[in-house]
Amino acid sequence: MRKHSRRFTKILQKIELYKIYDPLEGINLLAQLSNVNFIETIEAHIALGLDPKYADQQLRSTVILPYGTGKIIRVAVVTKGEKIAEAKEASADIVGSEDLIDEIANGRLDFDKLIATPDIMPLIAKLGRILGPRGLMPSPKAGTVTTELINAISDFKKGKVEYRIDKSGVLHIPFGKLNFRVEDLYANLVALKDSIDKNKPSGSKGKYWKSVYLSSTMGPSISIDFNRLKD
């Protein structure tokens, strides 16, 4: 049986094990319990009544968090022609065409998001084994295959987050840092819930929302009452 550190054990003593917390109370508690020497990320772990082995029960989408993630996002863009200048003007961190594709094939991965225009996607297909496992492969569903480069770059830098369920039907989504105002983290969480409801798969049957747990990078997880997440 895995033993917790002394620091973690002390934190656990301040949590009511079987309590389902009010969302605001839960966020505030995680912020108060943080005692590490860096600013922790807060994540939502959401179990849904979906079985992703069925095509009509898969969930993958994006949401723009109103207060961002607190993370500086490096955006790379692969395109060609006039779109190269457009991407540079929109403050993309890395811009290229076939030359950037070759660099990525040779191991360059110093970016958090890769955006591509549709006309160059056939050339990017060969990078699937490199980009796929890292969640970096451009996709129309994720908003990373588009001709609207200015909007896409701006959205991801402001805090647009991609999410998708794992094999067990659970979403794992960071929605800010613990140094945010509690009210701002709550607003991000509400935006997340609204997006998940809006993108409910057509094949969803029975109870859609099963449970929501919040956790911080080095902290415990606590259960929250998702029915109380309202604007």
Image (cartoon, rainbow, N blue to C red):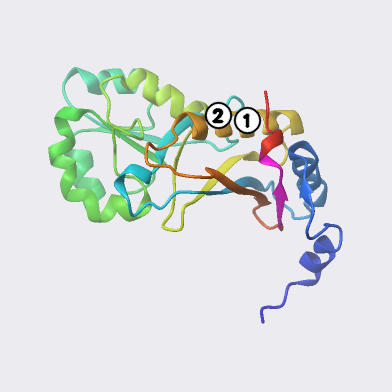
Circle 2 residue: 194
Residue shown at 84%/65% (left/top)?
10
Q: Quadrant of the C terminus?
A: top right
Q: Quadrant of the N terminus?
A: bottom right
Circle 1 residue: 190
As helix, strand or loop, the secondary structure at mark 2 comes to helix
Q: Nearer the viewer, residue 202 or 95?
A: 202
Q: Residues within 10 Å of mark 1 (few under 14, many from 20)?
A: many
Say which amino acid is labelled 1: Val
> Magenta includes 224?
yes
List x then y, in percent, for residue 119. Answer: 15, 28
- Main SS, magenta residues: strand
Farthest residue, direction front: 206
Q: Residues within 10 Å of mark 2 (few under 14, many from 20)?
A: some
The number of callouts visible is: 2
Residue shown at 45%/24% (left/top)?
155
Say which amino acid is labelled 2: Asp
Image height check: is 213 above or below 187?
Answer: below
Quarter of image, res 124? top left
List x then y, in percent, for residue 190. Answer: 63, 30
As helix, strand or loop, the secondary structure at mark 1 comes to helix
Q: CA distance from mark 1 to mark 2?
A: 6 Å
Q: Which residues are magenta?
A: 221-226
Q: Nearer the viewer, residue 94 or 188?
A: 188
List x then y, in percent, for residue 167. Answer: 41, 57
